[in-house]
Image (spheres, rainbow, N blue to C red):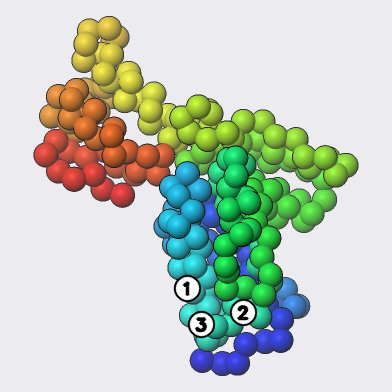
Amino acid sequence: MKAAPRQLFVGVDGGGTGCRARIVDSEGRVLGTGIAGPAALRLGIDTSLAAVEHACQAALEEARLPPDALAGADAAIGLAGIGRKGLLEQLTARKHPYRSVTYVNDATIACIGAHAGEDGGIVIVGTGSIGFAVVGGREIRVGGYGFPISDEGSGADLGLHGIRLALRSHDGRGVETNFTREVMARFGSDPFEAVAWMDRAHATLRQVRAAGGPPRQ
């Protein structure tokens, strides 16, 4: 391990599919990057911050910096779902390993990164979806209120609609297609297997389980 530079900056993108951290020095040089699992706050604050810490520690390892180097770093952490009532207050009240930390929405950091802090807008379509822009210091937001009530066109939303179509076709309420047959085949053509899977499913569950097998993340 090498000694930590005088000043470190940590940037974290914590989304519904994964979490990425990057450590840079005061000259903007990238020292290390790290990745971890989903960090969306709908999974719980503990799960989210554990993913953030894992990604940051991986970045430290790549940078060959000691584990306690974060104590001298200023961090900006973007987390999906931070707009949920009370979450920002809970986050800021928790202890953290950084010299200072700012928590914002993951769309905010994406927009800042895309336009280098200047006015502009983005559309994110991944596990969730959102339209976000900053114009004249004013934030403009469209959607992105969380699955399942929002995030139209996202991977989670499309998956939910796919399951619904498959169940409707199984009941004879919709047209059966190769797609709906393949979806139902994952559940052994038993709709109550789909119900059992749904009870444990969330927006970041990547693969429908085969009947009789455990869900795979």
Circle 1 sits in a helix, a strand or a loop, which is it?
Answer: helix
Q: Is residue 193 left or right of residue 32?
A: left
1 or 3: mark nearer the eye: 3
Give me the residue at 75% from left, 35% from top. Answer: 140
Q: Amino acid at mark 2?
A: Ala
N-terminal of the pair, mark 1 or mark 2, is 1
Q: Nearer the viewer, residue 93 or 145?
A: 93
Disc number placed over residue 58 in the picture, else none: 1
Q: Residues within 10 Å of mark 3 (few under 14, many from 20)?
A: some
Q: Amino acid at mark 1?
A: Ala
Residue hosting label 2: 71
Residue 145 pos. (x, y %): 57, 33
- Give the image quarter of residue 75: bottom right
Image height of 51 relative to 166, above or below: below
- Give the image quarter of residue 100: bottom right
State yes or no: discs 3 and 2 in contact (Cβ < 8 Å): no
Residue hosting label 3: 67
In the rendered picture of this protein, how many numbered marks are placed on residues? 3
Can residue 192 be seen by looking at this rendering? yes
Can residue 16 be seen by looking at this rendering? no
Distance between the Cα atoms at labels 1 and 2? 16 Å
Image height of 3 relative to 36, above or below: below
Residue 152 pos. (x, y %): 53, 28
Q: Nearer the viewer, residue 187 or 6?
A: 6
